[in-house]
Image (cartoon, rainbow, N blue to C red):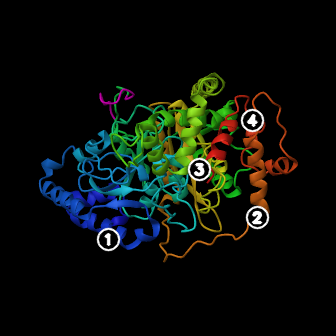
Amino acid sequence: MLNKLNIAEARRKLLAKEISATELTQACLDRLAAIDQHYHAFLSSNADKALAQAAQADALLESTKLTNGKPLLGIPIALKDNLAVEGEPLTCASKILENFISPYDSTVATKLKDAGAIFIGRLNLDEFAMGSSTENSAFGPTKNPWALDRTPGGSSGGSAAAVASDQCIAALGSDTGGSIRQPAAFCGCVGLKPSYGRVSRYGLVAFASSLDQIGPVAKTAEDAATLLNVIAGHDPRDSTSVPESVPDFTAALSAPINDLKIGLPKEYFIHGLNPDVRTSVESAIKTYTNLGAKMIEISLPHTEYVIATYYLIATAEASANLARFEGIRYGHRVEGEDLFTLNSKTRGKGFGPEVKRRVILGTYSLSSGYYDAYYLKAQKARTLIRQDFRKAFEKVDLILTPTTPIPAFRLGDKVSDPLQIYLLDIFTISANLVGNCGISLPCGFTKDPKLPIGLQLLSKPFGETALLHAAHAFEQATEWGHHKPEIRPWSKPTRPNAQSCQQRANNTLTHDLLHARPGRNHQPSKVARKKSKNFPFPLLMPLPPFNYFVCLSLSLQLFPC
């Protein structure tokens, strides 16, 4: 089936005229029509537009000269629905933008068009990219192609699910705290988060401006490199875009990795990792050792502050960015007798619970009397975290970690306890705080059920060449990237009728975390202490002194799920 090709394979066949762009696009559209009613990776698609673009690509492919400078000519690509494409919906999976049509192209969309890509649809996400399971979408969750009762991850869950189920050849997502890498790990594909400033954010609907980055979700590291070649580069329309030269990321993929120094942070290989995750990552370490890489233990001592720091900064920036959705200029509008009522009714009806929760938390942390206690201290902690990585990269070329501490969890399991989902970001969010680049690639599977496991590689800012080189070498030495999910008939996921003792213990631990107070030597309950021995993040207890969780407690009480 043509839709199962990756970019490199499809490109070779297109240039050899073994297939046409129309045939390739039709194969993807047929796959979408056949299965996406069960997976809900796409929010919208336009077959007529896609086939018209494919016909134009075929006309260009007839002339070899016209294909120069168009590395994606005839390749069907899908975009996360927070990336602007002129004339296409731009909903951010939110009711407040349900009927909004983008009046302009994002920079990445313009570059993809110039490279000859064909846009086949808009992909589902957590509302305004706030979430880790795609369950926060106002239009329903996406399901994992490996198991319909499991989450594909988030917020770019639609992107990862579409690529893993071969509904498109590749996709773009956005990564604010792991939102490309975590779904890629859960769905068994490759997800690349470029360095901050490497790819223009112009036309990306902002969540947290100092953390957001656009990147590819693909079937191979080579495909990710090809996409990065297209979308990377300085953009004067984005003040955070860095005027850094863009190398050919595909040029040195096949070079040997002899003498590559890879750091293993001891804080990331913690008690509580899922056993299958630990086994797969340890096997990946052996693979790299056999390829000639040298493993070096390193320390990132401020890792315990990463979760608190990230969620203070991200929510504060989200509070400011989402202030523009007030029902006056664009988007959904609910009338009121005065401006305040109109604004509050519009946002109350238009935003979902998770967005409200984060806006409240961010506003609280920026408010008078709390700015210094929370936001300012978070920025200071961010500096310390950045210094940890700078020191580490003086000793090593790359850092290797699990992408996530557990495989894909069941849909609905963590909706009632958002803090548990927040804690699962522990391995991915540091790259966004620091501005590093990172990639997730398949490194194994759980035993029962068979679910993908992701390996994360991190490099210093603008170190994508080394990152992709090492990822490609691992792919060539293993078979994990060749596995495909078995697309089964849809069946309704099962739900437990009563809360288990294990879940109650989780909630007791969460309650203790939520209600700790700054400046207090908080002691968790006996149940929580017992549970914390097996909890994936014992390093978060006791909590840091600038306790973010008191803010979260307020927002959870105001907007319970």
Neighbor class of circle 2 (other Cα within 10 Å; few <14, some 14-19, many 20+) is: few
Q: Are marks 1 and 3 in contact (CB under 8 Å)?
A: no
Answer whether residue 256 is visible to the viewer in this image.
Answer: no
- Left or right, 531 with respect to 62, comes to right
- The residue that label 1 is drawn on is 30
- The residue that label 3 is drawn on is 287
Sequence-first disc among 4 and 2? 2
- The circle drawn on residue 500 is 2
Where is residue 243, by image quadrant? Answer: top left
Q: Residue at x 27, y 67 (%)?
A: 26
Tag in front: 1 or 3: 1
- Left or right, 398 with respect to 81, comes to right
CA distance separating discs 3 and 4: 36 Å
Residue range of the region highlighted in magenta in the rendering: 233-241
- The circle drawn on residue 543 is 4
- The circle drawn on residue 59 is none
- Residue 209 location, x and y as percent? 45, 33
CA distance separating discs 4 and 1: 51 Å
Task: Give the amino acid type for the residue marked by disc 3 in the picture.
Answer: Thr
Neighbor class of circle 4 (other Cα within 10 Å; few <14, some 14-19, many 20+) is: many
Neighbor class of circle 3 (other Cα within 10 Å; few <14, some 14-19, many 20+) is: some
